[in-house]
Image (cartoon, rainbow, N blue to C red):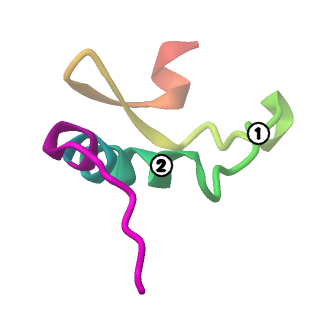
C-alpha cells in the first residue's frame, strides 16, 4: 500500500512558487574586493548605464 501525505492545494502551490526563489541562493559569487573591481566596468545605477570610473 502506498501512503500519501495529505497536503492542501495551497501548500503545494506555495512550494511550487518557492522553487524558483531557491535558485537565487545557489552559486552566489563572492563579493569582490576594491582592488579586484575594474574601473572600466559598466554598471547600471537608477536606470543610467555608466562606467564605474564615472562614479568616483
Q: Report x, y in % for residue 7.
A: 29, 48
Circle 2 residues within 10 Å: few <14, some 14–19, many ≥20:
few
Q: Which residue is disc 1 drawn over?
A: 32
Q: Where on the picture, by quarter, is residue 31?
A: top right
Indicate the quadrant containing the N terminus: top left, top right, bottom left or bottom right. Answer: bottom left
- Looking at the image, residue 51 lies above or below residue 13: above
| 33 and 19: which is toward the camera | 19
Left or right: where 33 falls relative to 29: right
Q: Residue at x 15, y 45 (%)?
A: 9
Front disc: 1 or 2: 2
Label 1, secondary structure: give it. loop
* View extreme (bottom): residue: 1
Q: Earlier in the sequence, mark 1 or mark 2?
A: 2
Q: How far apart are marks 1 and 2 (CA)?
A: 23 Å
Is residue 19 toward the left or the right of residue 28 in the image? left
Residue 24 drawn at (x, y percent): 48, 47
Residue under the point 17% across and 37% down: 10
**Closer to us: 2 or 29:** 2
Pointer 1 and pointer 2: residues touching (CB < 8 Å)? no
Mark number, residue 22: 2
Say which mark, if any, is on residue 12.
none
Q: What element carries label 2?
A: helix
22 or 11: which is nearer to us?
A: 11
**Quadrant of residue 39 within the rendered picture:** top right
Residue located 33% across and 47% down the image: 15
Measuring from the top left, give residue 28's x and y in whole percent: 64, 50
Q: Residue furthest left?
A: 9
Residue at far front of view: 1
- Dominant secondary structure, magenta: loop
Specify the segment rendered in magenta: 1-12
* Neighbourhood count class around disc 1 (C-alpha, 10 Å): few under 14, some 14–19, many 20 upward: few
Amino acid at each position: 500500500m502506498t501512503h500519501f501525505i495529505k497536503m492542501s492545494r495551497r501548500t503545494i502551490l506555495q512550494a511550487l512558487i518557492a522553487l524558483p526563489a531557491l535558485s537565487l541562493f545557489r552559486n552566489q559569487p563572492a563579493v569582490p574586493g576594491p582592488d579586484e573591481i575594474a574601473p572600466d566596468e559598466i554598471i547600471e545605477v537608477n536606470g543610467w548605464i555608466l562606467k564605474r570610473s564615472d562614479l568616483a
